[in-house]
Image: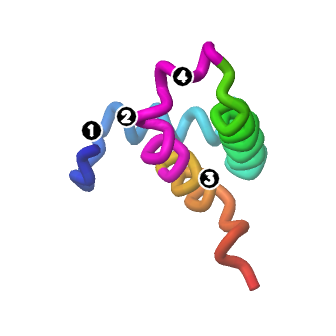
Amino acid sequence: MSTKNTLSKEAETRLIDFFNHIIDPEDMAKILRQVNCILALGVTRQHETLQIGLLNFEDNYYWLNELAEILNPYLSEE
């Protein structure tokens, strides 16, 4: 996964619009955490439909949690 730290102006504008007009960042962070939990449970229980993504699951889980932390720091709070 690339860690290049540049967003196009269009992507930046879309993200700002998304979080200003469509969904609250804290709500999105909650959704990301819920989806990550469901995916983690599914993979650990070895559902056949999730086996396809098993190889990338660990990285994807990490990056979704990172995004959730940016939107609403939860794990880093005291």
First in sequence: mark 2 vs mark 3:
2
**Residue pictured at 49% horizontal, 31% vertical:** 54
Marking on residue 68 = 3
- Closer to the chain start, of discs 4 and 2, is 2
Question: Residue 47, how many percent across, how many down?
Answer: 68, 21
Secondary structure of the residue carrying numbered label 4? helix
Q: Which quadrant of the figure has residue 5?
A: bottom left
Sequence-first tag of 4 and 3: 4
Q: Earlier in the sequence, mark 1 or mark 3?
A: 1
**Tag of residue 8:** 1
Residue found farthest to the top:
49
Category of crowding for the residue at label 2, using alpha-carbon neighbours closer than 10 angstroms: few (below 14), some (14–19), many (at least 20): few
Q: Nearer the viewer, mark 4 or mark 2?
A: 4
Give how far across and how far down residue 41 sits, in percent. 74, 38
Three-letter amino acid code at the position of disc 3: Ala
Can you tell which mark lies on residue 42? none
CB contact under 8 Å: marks 2 and 3: no
Give the residue number, with chain letter if any, for mark 4. 51
Identify the residue under disc 2. 11
Q: SS at mark 3?
A: helix
Q: How far across and down, in percent of the image, does residue 57 sit?
A: 49, 38
Q: Could you tell me which quadrant the N terminus lies in?
A: top left
Amino acid carrying mark 1 in the image:
Ser
Of 33 and 24, nearer the camera is 33
> Going by the image, does 33 lie left or right of 9?
right
| Chain part drawn in magenta | 48-62
How many angstroms separate mark 4 from mark 2 (CA)? 31 Å
